[in-house]
Image (cartoon, helix red, strand yellow):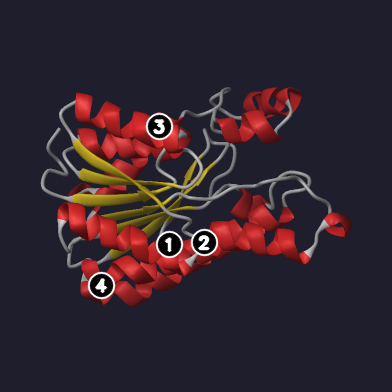
Amino acid sequence: MSSLKGKVAVVTGGSRDIGRAISIKLANEGAKVVVNYYNSEVGAKETVDEIKSLGGDAIAVKADVSKLDDIRILKAKSIEAFGDKVDILVSNAGGLFARKSLQELDESFYNLVMDVNFKSTVFVMQAFEPLMSKGASIINLSSQAARDGGGAGSSLYSSSKGAVSTFTRAMAKELGPKGIRVNAICPGMIATKFHDDFTKDEVRVNVANATPLRREGTAEEVADLVAYLASDESSFLTGNNVDINGGLAFS
């Protein structure tokens, strides 16, 4: 439980599903965790309470990370709680919001999807990078959809995640000389509320059956990968988009 002892982690969208599992995993490995949320106040409180019940340290901070003013609030609250350093930054905030065909898209929906999934990743990293030093690790949440275009009606979601994947590679080059590593994780079908809301049951069954491991993944399995990329055990890994999809798609 000590591989991340003494480190400070910021997790955007950290209150439920994959974000909650990441927050709890990092805390269990010894990190102090800033659990960011926007709508899920109850989930954020439950996440922080669970971390503290296990002997960890965490705070919950409400901020819409698609807005620069809110990102500044998140940064200020992090500094207030845990000092002016961040060792681990996990950009997990994101969403599909709705499945829409090309002719159903409008500017408002475009801005929503791109801002929450990509703009947030860019400007959260910009805000927190000055607090990071040699040995720090940034982990962005991309998606298998960035590779294959996603399912029907998810064109903007998959495109925004493609942007996250490319930005990850670019930042690995830019920040590498400072000793800061930047990687992304590309989950496939993970059993979360995301798919409860947006993926039909029969589609989930078909995808699971087409996966070599014949099942969906879990949020905890994604969190385990995040913890590895956050640790010194992955100290020579940067610029990667790491697939975690049970073998459904791979390089």
Q: Earlier in the sequence, mark 4 or mark 2?
A: 2
Whether residue 221 is visible here, answered yes or no, is: yes
Q: Which mark is residue 66?
A: 2
The disc labelled 4 sits on which kind of residue?
Pro
Q: CA distance from mark 1 to mark 3?
A: 30 Å
The disc labelled 3 sits on which kind of residue?
Glu
Front residue (pair 237, 165): 165
* Residue highlighted by disc 3: 221
Q: CA distance from mark 1 to mark 4?
A: 17 Å
* Residue highlighted by disc 4: 130
Front residue (pair 179, 82): 82
Q: Earlier in the sequence, mark 3 or mark 2?
A: 2
Q: Give the structural element (helix, strand or loop) at label 4.
A: helix
Mark whose residue sits in front, 4 or 2: 2
Q: Earlier in the sequence, mark 1 or mark 3?
A: 1
Q: CA distance from mark 3 to mark 2?
A: 27 Å
Whether residue 237 is visible here, answered yes or no, is: no
Mark whose residue sits in front, 3 or 2: 2
The disc labelled 1 sits on which kind of residue?
Asp
Q: Residue at x 72, y 45 (%)?
A: 98
Q: Residue at x 25, y 76 (%)?
A: 177
Whether residue 165 sits left or right of residue 57 in the image: it is right
**Height in image: 236 above or below 49?**
below
User: Residue 58: x percent and y percent?
Assistant: 24, 40
Q: Give the structural element (helix, strand or loop) at label 1.
A: helix
User: Residue 243: x percent and y percent?
Assistant: 48, 45
Q: Give the structural element (helix, strand or loop) at label 2.
A: loop
Q: Earlier in the sequence, mark 3 or mark 4?
A: 4
Q: Which mark is residue 70?
A: 1
